[in-house]
Amino acid sequence: MKATIHIGGRDYTADLNTGHSIAIPLQFDGPQPNSYGVPAATSIAYEDGTFVGDTRRGGSCNFETVSLTPHCNGTHTECLGHITDERISVEAIIPAGLKPATLITVSPEEALLSPESYFLVKEEQDRIISARMLRDALENADPDFLEALVIRTAPNDVQKCRRQYTEQPAPFFSAEAMQLVLEYKVQHLLVDIPSLDRAFDNGQLSTHHLFWNLAQGSHADAPDAHRGKSVTEFIYVPDYIPDGQYLLDLQIAPFVLDAAPSRPVLFSVSDHQPHDV
């Protein structure tokens, strides 16, 4: 099915039958990505008396109980409620529908070699996504396609789909990089790392606070907080998907939580070529 969509004064065509999922499939019985060393996500056949929810064990159907920590076990989308006392639900906040998006690829750099800053003292193992590299990658980006920004980091090996990030720390955003994201008015930020911040940052989540316009150290919702914005972490964008403009379908499990498992899908777009009359 092809659709014609009007964005920023121009018409674009998208084939809605050929989307690219950039979610990491969560294998309950196989390797999974993990941050903070939380227990792996599990799926266990439900048992109650003589009933067992597994046809291989004589059950009439498969009937499983799932346990997971959305922030740490795979692709998820989170909202302002991630850092507020108020229990704000991602399912209630994020609007449905296709969103103009831009995909870029950047190579994180050693933090100690960069003039850019972080909210804590930079350490030897730190690697950052810097404002400089974002500015270079977005030099020719169409502002109308920056409602969502998808960032792929290099190197882009498939191990991201099963990496244990307590053993291999991920890069994170410099303060200047996140400030640039704000200047571009990005509403939905998607990254292939477990967090916008350094994993062990004394619980400050400073870059998250900056993105959602919440005072540093505060957990109180504020009138000027960016309630409609979202962050999607733990994506994986295969190399065969080129940088450029897309439509994003941000599919989110309807969990009444600050974060929920999600399945972002990218659809390629092209300039609309009207048929001759």
Image (cartoon, rainbow, N blue to C red):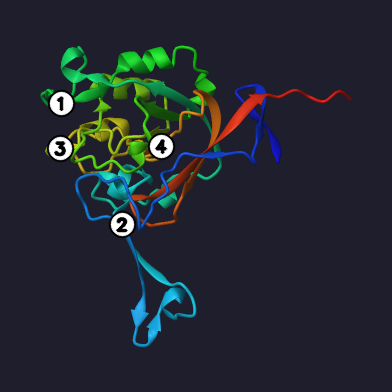
Q: Are marks 2 and 1 in contact (CB under 8 Å)?
A: no
Name the image quarter holding the N terminus: top right
Name the mark on residue 41.
2
Q: Residues within 10 Å of mark 2 (few under 14, many from 20)?
A: many
Give the Cα distance between marks 3 and 4.
Answer: 22 Å
Give the Cα distance between marks 1 and 3.
Answer: 12 Å
Name the mark on residue 236.
4
Q: Residues within 10 Å of mark 3 (few under 14, many from 20)?
A: few
- Name the amino acid type tagged 3: Phe
Give the Cα distance between marks 2 and 3.
Answer: 22 Å
Name the image quarter holding the C terminus: top right
- Name the amino acid type tagged 4: Tyr
Give the Cα distance between marks 2 and 1.
Answer: 28 Å
Q: Are marks 2 and 3 in contact (CB under 8 Å)?
A: no
Is 99 on the left-hand or right-hand side of 190?
right
Secondary structure under badge 1? loop
- Name the amino acid type tagged 1: Gln
Q: Are marks 2 and 4 in contact (CB under 8 Å)?
A: no
Write down the quadrant of residue 111 in the picture.
Answer: top left
Of marks 2 and 3, the one in the foreground = 2
Is 142 on the left-hand or right-hand side of 189?
right
